[in-house]
Amino acid sequence: MTTIATERKGLALRPGAWLVWGAVVFFLLILAGVVGAVVVDSFGTRWFSGWLPSGWTSRWYGKTWHEFDLGNVLVVTLEVAVAVVMVSLVVGVPAAYALARRTFPGKRVLMVAFMLPILIPPITYGVPLATVLYKFHLAGKLSGVILANLVPAVPFVILVMTPFIEQIDPKIESAARMCGARTRVIFTRILGPLLIPGMLAAAVLILVRTVGMFELTFLTAGSDSQTLVVALYYSVSAAGIRAQQEIDAMAVIYTLFMLVLLVVALRFVNPTQLVTQIKEKD
Amino acid sequence: MAAPAAPATAGRIALRHRLADRGMDRTLLLLVPAVVFIVALFIYPFVYGLQLSFQPQPGSETVQRYGSGPFADYHAFFADSYLRNTIWTTLKLSLPAGLFNVIASVPIAYRMRGKFRGKRTITTILVVPITLGTVLTAEGLLAFMGPTGWLNRLLIDVGIVDHPVRFTHNYWGVLFSLIISGFPFAFLLTLSYLSGIDPTLERAAATLGAGWWQRFRFITLPLLAPGLAITFCLTFVLAFSVFPSAVMVGDPSGTTRVISIAAFHAAFEQYDYSMASAIAMIMGAVELIVVGLVLGWRASLYRGASGGKG
Amino acid sequence: MSGSKISELRLDHVSRGFGEVLALDGLDLTIEGGEFVALLGPSGCGKSTALNCLAGLLPLTGGSITLDERRIDTLPPEQRGFGMVFQNYALFPHMSVRANIGFGLKMAKVGKAEAQRRVDEAVRLVQLGDHAAKFPGQLSGGQQQRVAIARAIVLEPALVLMDEPLSNLDAKLRLEMRTEIRRIHQTLGLTTVYVTHDQEEALSLADRLVLLREGKVQQVGPPETVYTEPANRFVAGFMGYRNELELPVSSVADKTVVLGDLTGTRREDLGETAVAAIRPEDFTVGDGPNAMEVDVEVVEFQGREQAIQARTAGGDELHLRVQARLAPGDRVTVSVPPERVLVFAADSPAAPEEVA
Amino acid sequence: MSGSKISELRLDHVSRGFGEVLALDGLDLTIEGGEFVALLGPSGCGKSTALNCLAGLLPLTGGSITLDERRIDTLPPEQRGFGMVFQNYALFPHMSVRANIGFGLKMAKVGKAEAQRRVDEAVRLVQLGDHAAKFPGQLSGGQQQRVAIARAIVLEPALVLMDEPLSNLDAKLRLEMRTEIRRIHQTLGLTTVYVTHDQEEALSLADRLVLLREGKVQQVGPPETVYTEPANRFVAGFMGYRNELELPVSSVADKTVVLGDLTGTRREDLGETAVAAIRPEDFTVGDGPNAMEVDVEVVEFQGREQAIQARTAGGDELHLRVQARLAPGDRVTVSVPPERVLVFAADSPAAPEEVA
Amino acid sequence: GGGAKDLTPGNVPDNPKNPVTLNIIDVAGNLQLTKGMIDEFVKTHPKVIKKVTYTNATAPELPGKIKAQQSAGQVQIGLVLTGTDALSAGIDQNLWVKTDDYASRLGNANYQAPAQKMQELAQGHGVEVVYYPSGPLIEYNPKTVSKPPATADELLAWAKAHPKKFQYARPANSGPGRTFLMGLPYILGDSNPKDPKAGWSKTWSYLQELTKYVDYYPSKTSETMSNLANGSADIIATTTGWDINPRALGQVPAGDKVAYLKGMHWVTDAQYAVVPRGVSADVLSADLQLIKWMLTPQQQAKAYDDGYFYPGPAVNGVTVQMAPQKSQQVIQQFGRPEYDQWIPKFPTETSLPAQQQVAAFDQWDRTVGSGKVKK
Ligand SMILES: Nc1ncnc2c1ncn2[C@@H]1O[C@H](COP(=O)(O)OP(=O)(O)OP(=O)(O)O)[C@@H](O)[C@H]1O
Ligand SMILES: Nc1ncnc2c1ncn2[C@@H]1O[C@H](COP(=O)(O)OP(=O)(O)OP(=O)(O)O)[C@@H](O)[C@H]1O
Ligand SMILES: [Mg+2]
Ligand SMILES: [Mg+2]
């Protein structure tokens, strides 16, 4: 009955809950300020001081868009991001599975080898990696950017996915095998659906990292395979004079782009939807 | 029934089973693509960088001071307190950031377990900052928390302070930005790991008299811990290699001179790639120590299915 | 009742729905302190739901639960102080057997030494001495189940809820555990609500049986009453009256009914046709009351007795359980005393449809 | 055998250890095509381990498995083509009941219409028609178990492994399911290995029983043999010979042994003292062979019969199962025919220690 | 670069055999000044260049990218537009084609005298395309600073009197910041303004004194500009271009003023066109023609731009009147007549060679920026 329901809700909102939600609201307010300041500035004519800019304009967006040919850049960025996410999941999840389910001699060494690309900054391996890719005529175009970005992405997927796989009862896989399912089917039909929250999380994080990975992208990109982050970093830190609003506009475009991808991703899957939660129907 | 040949069969144990008992079966084939990939695209460049770090650049300051032995660059790094201290500076930023992000995301994710209206919206809002990117975060912090930013205006108008407070270009600015970018990351992971824990277990604990804190402390947390360890490692690593925000909202010559600034300086200002490689290797080693400790601890935890029967 | 920690637990019209369907539909039940109540019913009838509602793990969609005049249905589970053995065990996978069992004691802040002692005793009770250091994932099904039992009773809670706690144990161990459960119930003065699908277990353990069907109570009463005087055709079917013969009513005289050749005992008001329900084990081979000739079709060995499937001259299938050794093809005369032939109305709620 | 898809499955010295301990210790067994073999044994004796080894889900630590002269123990499970009902069900939590049951058919690339038909039939068979669209998390324990059964048999595999498939069903449904399992086994010519803790189920279903104890086979044989001629004290205890009287041997004449006042049948070579094992239901109230006076202590209602705990003049505790109505405090004479008193050596492997 | 095959003047044709696609990468913001020149060349010389692609990038990472391409024998970048930083890094790492070998094809550029000195920094491995005298200058808010400091000492005194109100950005990240740093030795009369390690003792002690009154060092010039605009700073370091362009863009109030410190020498700056080794003969041929074109006075006039690199042209005889109309307007409105006097009035010095610059930045980081100095 409703009385019961409300009573339970009431119980849930003890001081601890207030504290948590209070902290969340505080965080979100700060965040709103941070984002708001940039967005407002990017639409302002000039803003020396005061609560708001002295006038409004959208010309900064037009300017950046043309300067960097952003239409093309966004398409490339999307292609790179999607490809990296897909390939790294396809390569990484099975490896994570093997690492989660088996203990075998040499596992530690392998783990370290998988960890290194995340730990070691691209400064060291970026140039030789790019050399290899150029040598095989892979760099200077989309494929190079994708391959280079996969280097940290694959281990990242492995690391993120391992605990998710450990959470799944191996008996369920055994049951599938008893139904005649081969490994590939087990991945597509059993583990896949069960791992969706994990894969979504991994995909989102890879996406963020890939779209934000400047060094490896820059080193391997050709003139028509630049991604957004290269343009963004250029506008922030390259020599020359740019209006602050233009940089802000660029940052807003970057964020909007990511936001669209994120919202699309979250539309497809809910990160908290896991099958055990079906039990939580109430 | 007992076959007459039984004694003979006793020793006839298939190699397959013996290997499988040690964890080696066809499942390991699943590692092949990833291993091939890493070997092909990472190991060679990494070894190249590693050996570069043992070959000090002729004519560089290192060679002038410490000779051209294989460890000269490392020697140079550790002999120079300005360089050496970057390790501590970085740890001082990345450990608190990593810990905070993980610790803060746990109670929030824990609150989000059950089903309630607006849950999806709140989740999305909390994850959205992940899309901001370092640049917007940095620009936003500078604008919002700057001397004439909204925050300072508000504080002055409300009368809490009478001079603008400097929130940026110091340790706190960088920490803020690490939290803004790292928290959603940690939250998303924690929330997802949490969703894999069977809610029946908490109920069982409740029938045994465990209140919410005890249920959290003794049931959820231990089952979540392996995931938290990974989450911490990843946020820590991201924070450890912080670069753009350490420069943009930090104090890159002083309190936020993180190790990647030193590496950047060596690689892209001095163009001393061997020194840069050496610094990067030191970075990797320090991270590996922290991550190794955490993962070592993780290995001692229960990791496995969290479901009951069926 | 003697030494029991609670004196009365009252369920008033307790209901619980999942979506549209009511898994528990207006359950009224008063349990006295110290009582041992068994819930029985076909699979999916709402037994586990009832226990979950009692434990506070499922919010009610209607009704109330009162413990000693105090309304408890709004209390969270940890404040009710009931113990529960889950049907699927719900063991803590990250704790050893000992730690699983000791968890409740830890929560109750029982002293170290005392807790140790009680855990040891519980471990011994469920015969897991050799496995006390193992984790649930390393145990066999029956061993897991025993951990679940030990975990619930080590706390000596006022009310213990047990959901098929012995289903995965072998006959021998089961008998032993059954005795232990009964003993603990009595010596500690617990109040127990016990779900089982094992009729013998229910009959021998419980003070009262509650028969559920599709979320609704069918009969409540002491084992003997339910066993010998089932309230309706459903209860009869469920309590082992496997043979149901639908026959026209010839004559009714008080409790005695004649249906064709059969004489039986009336349990309800009857229409034109009625159903005679007879247990397989109530038949005896040889002449006697209600004698009939049957052809033996299938014989199953069941130890001292045999389960026989036979066919009457009228073509009805009969299940018999007899000590005499019979073989398929035999034609024998069987008989059954009229007081063991229960006659229900043809439209009395029946057991769920059998597979065609 | 008739229509069976396999003709012989041979287990040679199959062993499986967990760490130091052997959960399965040199299991030798040959199963003929079409046979129905039941594995019995106390909780934790290695039954599930044996099934898992057969299915290929656990690597062996010793021995080999041969199917029709082809060694299969190195084959991965999905290539063996066996079906299995898991003790803990292991349903796919993200699939509906229908999808769970239809999964194997999909793997076998059975046509849509055909698959649909077979799933429908299986759903009907396990009486889940109303629940076919639900997810496992929304089912009751018994309903989940039935899904597991349907999932395994819908594929009509050559060999079916069932691990306590009926443990969570009520008596009525259980009987029905038992009949169905037997029917499917016969009509489809399956070979079945069945784990159960329910002696009656084992006796009535199986062609042969395999008794395990701590990973080792104790006896293999048809139900009647195992039931009436248990190979050792352990098997006897497990098969329901609950009363064990340890007595000095007075005289031995071929198979007939006299132990004090008791006359019994020898099953093994004896030492100076021996153990007489008697089933509770083999006692009859009244004078007869081996008559003794006992004092009734505890009476449990068990339907038509009563379970009695009594004490002999010598102070030994006896379990009886009688139809006569007795009450605690009664003193009665009971008797048991000598052929039902089995005498084992005192050091014959005993059933696991009872709780002190 | 091992894989790069070297071309000799002999095997580079006057005209490409086929029109080339030229990938131009700009790491100095140079395209703002030169894009017009290049586009016009492409339009008028379809036989030489079929298509250009422009890429913007940051300077530090560029040498690595070129090195990767050269090691793989796959040089895809046809022309680099850079400041002194990547220029000299490339020279050190032998990345650039020796353009001096092709001097005859490039013709005589007729550089202004100080621009000629800047060209020498290229050591024959690049061609200067734009030049400006840069700074150091100080920019102030006339509303709060009635009389700007005229000497270094006055600046220090002013900073002391107005703590936190003087600002310059971290030299490693800022043009005006580094110009201020490189200009101080001349203003303070240091022993060797070209040797930051040994010859800048006055500069370093001056800066360490000054830092006590500086709140913090922003990481970007534009932040000092914002601070000047919003009133949290009153005096900042600047250059000619950073004075004109931000006011034109509206980043800084148009009314803010500039001043110089006594003893001022211009520390000049320039940008270069360089060609990575390993490009094909056709591309090199096209590059040479393009560079030659860019150095003609008509094209150079485009370098006036919006005052970003004021004045901009590197060669003699280019007046504002030759610049595009829009340029003229901006300079009319935001330019400063006094620059026409100041530019010839003060001696010019080339900026430090890259390595010394880096050493100076490092020293600055350690001794000034690190905050070791107690405030
Ligand atoms: N992963 C494991 N690690 C250690 N011991 C194990 C593991 N799995 C099973 N065992 C042990 O092996 C023995 C046999 O287990 P098994 O599951 O085969 O028993 P079972 O005969 O099926 O019992 P039950 O009837 O209770 O299900 C048990 O004592 C169990 O504790
Ligand atoms: N989360 C749920 N959503 C929908 N229906 C549910 C849910 N949980 C249980 N049910 C349904 O409610 C009914 C009662 O379930 P319950 O678990 O109480 O049965 P039970 O009597 O314990 O049966 P069993 O003996 O098989 O365990 C069942 O038909 C079941 O399918
Ligand atoms: Mg149930
Ligand atoms: Mg088992």
Image: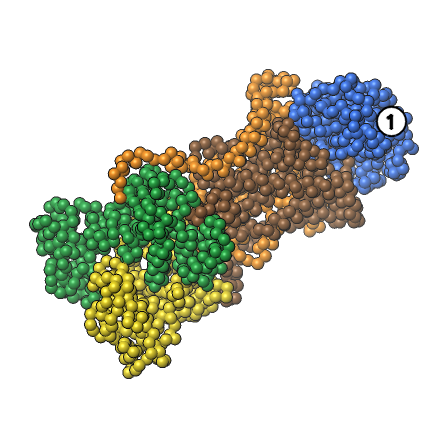
Chain colours: A brown, B orange, C yellow, D green, E blue
Q: Residue furthest right?
A: E321
Question: Residue E338, how many percent across, how many down?
Answer: 88, 31
**Is residue B190 visible in the rendered structure shown here?**
no
Mark 1 vs ligand 2: CB below 8 Å: no
x 62%, y 34%: residue: A148
Which residue of the protein is positioned furthest toward the front in this rendering? D2
Q: Tell me the crowding category of disc 1: few under 14, some 14 to 19, or many 20 or more residues within 10 angstroms, Cα based.
A: some
- Picture quarter with the C terminus of chain E: top right
E5 displayed left or right of C45: right
Q: Would you say A5 lies left or right of E168 here?
A: left
Residue A181 can be seen, yes or no: yes
Between B70 and B150, the one lying in front of the other is: B70
Relative height, residue A61 to residue E307 (above, below): below
Image quarter for ligand 2 equals bottom left
Residue drawn 58% across the image and 34% down it: A151
Q: Position of residue C82 (x, y in %)?
A: 38, 59
Q: Quadrant of residue C64?
A: bottom left
The type of residue carrying mark 1 is: Thr
Residue at the (11%, 58%) spot, across then down: D290
How many marks are shown on the rendered structure? 1
For disc 1, the marked residue is E296
Q: Residue at x 20, y 72 (%)?
A: C287
The image position of residue D312, as x and y in percent, is: 14, 58
- The residue closer to the viewer here, E365 or D251, is D251
The chain containing the residue under callout 1 comes to E
Residue E33 in which image quadrant:
top right
Relative depth, front residue between C243 and E60: C243
**Residue B109: percent from left, percent from top:** 54, 50
Disc 1 element: loop
D332 sits to left or right of B38: left
> Which quadrant: the N terminus of chain E?
top right
